[in-house]
């Protein structure tokens, strides 16, 4: 198997298990499949093989990326939390907790993202 096909296979696995592919995934798939494979294994250990249930893991992830103010990751994490059985109210609570430690703008920015996602689901 050449690096290009193994990179494509890794990207497909990421898309299948996470529901999205990030820019850095595509770059690593093209230029460093070994790094992408290692990163994916670490992700799997933390998110797919956790002792915590998947909904809790998703809400923790949402809180952390909100605290980091990563708007792309907040959007993906919110979607994953919803897909994994969290309610919007639970997602809001996770973001409120993160704002306690990282500032009110964390909550303000994250709520804008959630509002846009909810509008898209209604329209």
Image: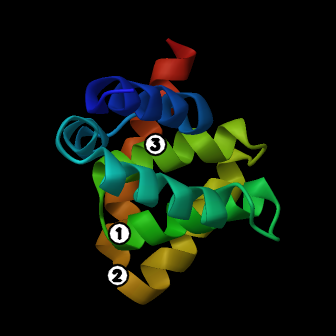
**Residue at image location 23% in from the left, 48% down from the top:** 32
Mark-to-mark CA distance, 2 and 1: 6 Å
Residue 21 appears in the figure: yes
- List the residue tagged with mark 2: 103
64 in relation to 2, above or below: below
Furthest-bottom residue in view? 101
Q: Residue at x 17, y 42 (%)?
A: 31
Q: Which residue is mark 3?
A: 76
Q: Position of residue 7 (x, y in %)?
A: 34, 32
Viewer-closest of 32 and 21:
32
**Image position of 115 (left or right of 24):** right
Contact (Cβ within 8 Å) of mark 2 with mark 1: yes
Label 3: which secondary element: helix
Secondary structure of the residue carrying tag 1 is helix
In this view, the residue in front, 123 or 61, is 61
Left or right of 113? Residue 81 is: right
- Give the camera-side residue of 67 and 50: 50
Q: Position of residue 46 (x, y in %)?
A: 62, 66
Where is residue 97, by image quadrant? bottom right
Q: Is residue 20 visible?
A: no
Q: Which mark is residue 106?
A: 1
Q: Earlier in the sequence, mark 1 or mark 3?
A: 3
Q: Position of residue 60 (x, y in %)?
A: 61, 68
Mark 3 or 2, nearer chain start: 3
Residue 65's mark? none
| Callouts 3 and 2 close, C-beta under 8 Å | no
**Whole-number angstrom distance, CA of label 3 to CA of label 2:** 21 Å
């Amino acid at each position: 198997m050449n690096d290009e096909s193994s990179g494509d296979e890794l990207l497909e696995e990421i898309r299948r298990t996470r529901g999205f592919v990030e820019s850095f995934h595509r770059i690593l798939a093209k230029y460093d499949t070994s790094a992408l494979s290692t990163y994916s294994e670490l992700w799997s250990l933390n998110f797919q093989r956790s002792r915590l249930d998947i909904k809790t893991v998703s809400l923790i992830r949402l809180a952390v990326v909100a605290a980091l103010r990563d708007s792309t990751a907040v959007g993906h994490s919110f979607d994953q939390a919803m897909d994994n059985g969290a309610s919007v109210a639970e997602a809001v609570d996770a973001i409120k907790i993160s704002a306690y430690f990282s500032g009110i703008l964390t909550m303000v920015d994250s709520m804008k993202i959630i509002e846009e996602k909810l509008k898209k689901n209604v329209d």
